[in-house]
Image (tube, rainbow, N blue to C red):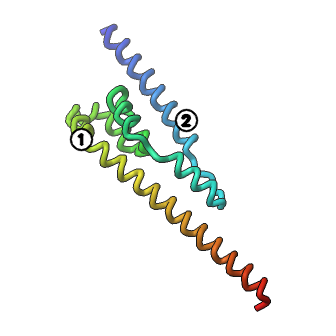
Amino acid sequence: MERLNSVERILAYLMLVVIIVAIIIIKRNKITNNSNSNMNKHYLQSQIKSSGTTYLLWFFFGFHYAYLGKWGLQILYWITFGGFFIWAIIDLFTLSGRIANHNALIFQQIDEIEKRDRDAEQARNLAMLLAAKGN
């Protein structure tokens, strides 16, 4: 009975540490509502995920969904012990696709920002040419 209490205590401390780490990561990843596209572009580039890091987090801590920003799935993953390890095995084969999808969305947003910046620069250059001509 006492051994069970010590195991429960250890699990409670472990869950507390996980919750604190989750809160720190969430606060660190908040997007500031800055209209500066260069700042948003740099932020998006910082959100590109590495497959190596994801697999290491999966193997050692089962922390891969949190790394990808999917906290609901992460908590469910922990509560079910990786879907009774079936989910964990499936993740072994599907993580690279999840990372590719995550990064593809980020690359698409970066491309949109760059296109908007190019269009704005082209409009400025055209306006300066027209002003120089006197039209």
Name the residue at the left extreme. Answer: 86
Q: From the viewer's side, name the closer residue of 9 and 30.
A: 30
| Quadrant of the image containing the C terminus | bottom right
Q: Is residue 23 above or below residue 35?
A: above
**Could you say which is closer to the camera, residue 90 or residue 97?**
97
Q: CA distance from mark 2 to mark 1?
A: 29 Å
Would you place residue 61 above or below residue 114 in this image?
A: above
Is the residue 57 above or below the residue 40 in the image? above
Residue drawn at x 36%, y 46% is 99
Identify the element where label 2 is drawn. Answer: helix
**In the rendering, at what x and y percent does residue 32 appear?**
62, 52
Furthest residue toward front: 133
Q: Amino acid at mark 1?
A: Phe
Q: Residue 4: where, in percent of width, then height?
A: 31, 13
Residue 89 or residue 127, whichever sits in front: 127
Where residue 51 appears, as percent x and y from the top left, is: 37, 40
In the displayed structure, 107 sits above or below 85; it is below
Q: Earlier in the sequence, mark 2 or mark 1?
A: 2
Residue at figure coordinates x 24%, y 38% from the top left: 87
The crowd level at tag 2 (other Cα within 10 Å; few <14, some 14-19, many 20+) is few
Q: Residue at x 32, y 9 (%)?
A: 3
The reply to whether dot 2 and dot 1 touch (C-beta < 8 Å) is no
Can you identify the residue that label 2 sits on? Answer: 24
Residue at which label 1 appears: 93
Amino acid found under the numbered disc labelled 2 = Ile
